[in-house]
Image (cartoon, helix red, strand yellow):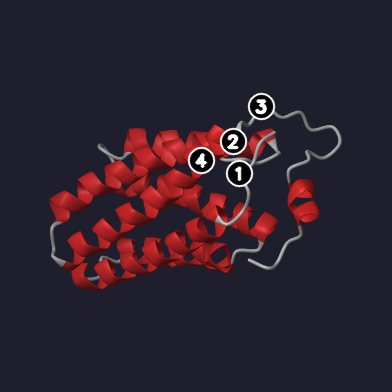
Amino acid sequence: MSKMTREEVVQHLTPPPGITMPPYPAKRDKIYRLSLVLMGTGLIFEGISGMARLASIQFWIQGAISAVLIVSGWTFLVWLKQWRWTVRTMVVLGFVLWPVWPLGGWALSLAAGAIMAAKETHCFHFWAGRVIPWYTLILGVLLIIHLSEPFMGVAWLGLAALWISLAAGRSKLPLFEI
């Protein structure tokens, strides 16, 4: 993150004219930050399971990460109502579809995460947030072409590192409250 002054952070927490926001207490921001850490941690387990070729365990880890992304999506702070509801819809559909269509459900969940990362970068200039959407897209292509599980495991660890970096940057900001 680039060095932001306290005034710049406050400016980012002030809705633009015409935007009405529901209350966003500091507790919700804590939950959001914790969900980002849990997502990064889950991706570490996804990577380790992939390297160990434990596909059935990966399936359940993907479900757990999708559930964590519901929490992230519901506590995600973005001014535009349409984006809030787009992300929320994607994470809920991702979780609901995951058991019956694992690739599609997982893709929706990860795409919603990529949107959240891009928004965090737009506001707070996290380098990892610039990479996460593209990295996620490449991972999706690699999943479709069925690369070997050990290679994919390493790729998941890369995504985990990016998310943990973003979560660490977010944790350095003051708690948000609106």
User: For the residue labelled by badge 2, is the local secondary structure a helix, a strand or a loop?
Assistant: helix
Q: What residue is disc 4 on?
A: 30
Tag 3: residue type?
Pro
Can you say whether 110 is above or below 149 in the image?
A: above
User: For the residue labelled by badge 4, is the local secondary structure a helix, a strand or a loop?
Assistant: helix
Tag 1: residue type?
Leu
The picture places residue 139, in percent across and down from the top left corner, at 38, 64
User: For the residue labelled by badge 3, is the local secondary structure a helix, a strand or a loop?
Assistant: loop
Q: What residue is disc 1 on?
A: 175
Residue 33, labelled with which disc? none
Of badges 3 and 2, the one in the foreground is: 2
Quadrant of the rendering where the C terminus is positioned? top right
Residue 26, labelled with which disc? 2
Of badges 3 and 1, the one in the foreground is: 1
The picture places residue 79, in percent across and down from the top left corner, at 70, 39
Please report whichever mark, 4 or 3, sits nearer to the chain's N-terminal start: 3
User: What residue lies at 79% left-to-right and 48% top-to-bottom?
Assistant: 11
